[in-house]
Image (spheres, rainbow, N blue to C red):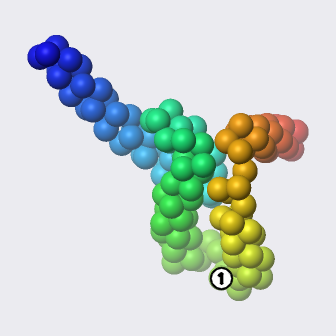
Amino acid sequence: MRLARRTQIRRGHMKKLFSRIGGVIVGFINGLLGAGGGMLAVPLLSASGLPTQKAHATSIAVIFPLSAFSAALYLADGRVNFWDAAVYLPWGLGGALLGSWLLPRIPSGLLRRVFGIFILWAAIRLLLR
């Protein structure tokens, strides 16, 4: 009984450590590359045991404040002009509404495949630039 309890406690500590390290990495990548941290957050959240749809939704909930904070830093530093970005906001919000409506309606297996294809497409595009 004691061994099982100790193993459970160790797993809990490892999960917390994994979450903290993952959070630092996701925040760093998000600040460095933009919202690219979401591509790391989903696999990390899935590896921590979240179901696919919940991992995607949680990733967005994590990435939103990180992106807002990064955007505020870029705006304050003068590296971004708000009005240049504002043109994309209404369309991005519309896409976010559509995506959040569609997410729970997509089977997990299909969602993983689509996400994987998107990551591969983005990687190939970046490598060929």
Which residue reaches farthest left? 2
Residue 31 in the image: above or below residue 112? below
Q: Is residue 126 left or right of residue 82?
A: right
The answer to whether residue 59 of the structure is visible from this angle is: no
Which quarter of the picture shows residue 92? bottom right
Image quadrant of residue 105?
Answer: bottom right
Check the image and name the residue furthest to the right. 128
> Image quarter for residue 85?
bottom right
Residue matched to label 1: 82
33 or 18, nearer to the observer: 18
Q: Residue at x 54, y 41 (%)?
A: 51
In the rendered image, the quadrant that contains the C terminus is top right
Nearest the eye: 30 or 19: 19
Considering depth in this image, is 77 or 36 the residue closer to the camera? 36
User: Pointer 1: residues within 10 angstroms few (<14), some, or many (20+)?
Assistant: few
Residue 106 at x, y percent in the picture: 72, 50
Q: Relative to 71, is 86 on the left or the right? A: right
